[in-house]
């Protein structure tokens, strides 16, 4: 088969994000699938009104798919710190104006909390919507770790330099790509998504889940579980 034929079979998938770091990661993760991965239109802004990562992912996927009339993949992810009652949580990206400022505020808030508990979790929720805006797939992945007192590493983005994973004695910013893909929240979520997305691309008419429900798969360091959530 010629490269022209392969290119012709590629389906457009819009990444429902303006975050260049996320778009870069998803292009790498999706590189082996017959997809033309594109960022959402620069003029498009979607208000994230959900109270959970999964709700925000659904909101963004639906809005971008409906606006572009293309398949859309949305990612909502963030950091939840136990000593801060789950903050910054769904407000992770809006915790401050830059990566450096967000890390600085996080460390200050932990210092003010006056606690030895620096445990935290990164969570990623992914949702895929078809061109009509209907949610066809949902998955969630998480990674547990600790918040360091000072940043380490030059890779990644966001809170990566202070998120330490004891399993490998490295921060996300220090990890090689293959390790982060395997252990990271987004990598775990994608590993849950990828086989179903491949099936969906092969046959877009197939039904996902049962009885009008879509399957949400949660992958964590302790294993996996399947939940049935109404896709409304």
Image: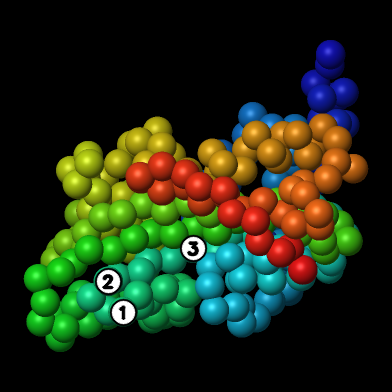
Q: Secondary structure at mark 2?
A: helix
Cβ atoms at labels 2 and 3 below 8 Å apart: no
Q: Residue 37 at x, y = what percent?
A: 70, 46
Q: Is residue 148 left or right of residue 36?
A: left
User: How many angstroms separate mark 1 from mark 3 (CA)?
Assistant: 17 Å
The percent position of residue 98, horizontal first and vertical second, equals 39, 74
Res. 17 mark = none
Q: Which residue is at a point 75% across and 41% down the rendered structure image? A: 36
Q: Is residue 92 left or right of residue 53?
A: left
Q: Secondary structure at mark 1?
A: loop
Q: Residue at x 28, y 63 (%)?
A: 120
In this view, which residue lies farthest toward the bottom? 112
Q: Position of residue 194 (x, y in %)?
A: 62, 38
> In terms of image quadrants, where is residue 204?
top right
Residue sticking out furthest to the top: 1
User: Mark 1 = which residue?
Assistant: 85
Say which residue appears at 53% left-offset and 72% top-offset.
52
Front disc: 1 or 3: 1
Read off the residue under disc 3: 77
Real-space Cα distance between discs 1 and 2?
Answer: 5 Å
Mark 1 vs mark 3: which is more N-terminal?
A: 3
Do tag 1 and tag 2 residues touch (Cβ < 8 Å)? yes
User: Which residue was labeled with disc 2?
Assistant: 82
Q: Is residue 177 visible?
A: no
């Amino acid at each position: 088969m010629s490269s022209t034929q392969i290119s012709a079979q590629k389906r457009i998938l819009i990444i429902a994000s303006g975050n260049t770091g996320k778009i870069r990661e998803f292009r790498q993760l999706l590189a082996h699938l017959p997809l033309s991965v594109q960022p959402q239109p620069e003029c498009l802004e979607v208000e994230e009104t959900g109270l959970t990562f999964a709700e925000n992912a659904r909101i963004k996927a639906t809005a971008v798919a409906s606006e572009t009339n293309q398949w859309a993949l949305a990612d909502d992810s963030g950091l939840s710190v136990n000593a801060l009652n789950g903050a910054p949580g769904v407000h992770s990206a809006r915790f401050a104006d830059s990566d450096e400022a967000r890390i600085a505020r996080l460390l200050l808030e932990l210092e003010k909390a006056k606690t030895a508990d620096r445990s935290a979790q990164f969570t990623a929720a992914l949702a895929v919507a078809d061109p009509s805006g209907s949610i066809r797939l949902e998955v969630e992945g998480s990674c547990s770790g600790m918040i360091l007192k000072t940043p380490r590493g030059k890779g990644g983005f966001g809170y990566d330099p202070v998120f330490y994973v004891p399993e490998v004695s490295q921060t996300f910013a220090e990890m090689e790509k293959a390790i982060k893909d395997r252990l990271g929240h987004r990598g775990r979520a994608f590993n849950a998504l990828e086989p179903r997305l491949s099936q969906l691309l092969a046959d877009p008419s197939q039904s996902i889940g049962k009885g009008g429900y879509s399957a949400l798969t949660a992958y964590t360091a302790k294993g996996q579980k399947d939940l049935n959530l109404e896709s409304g």
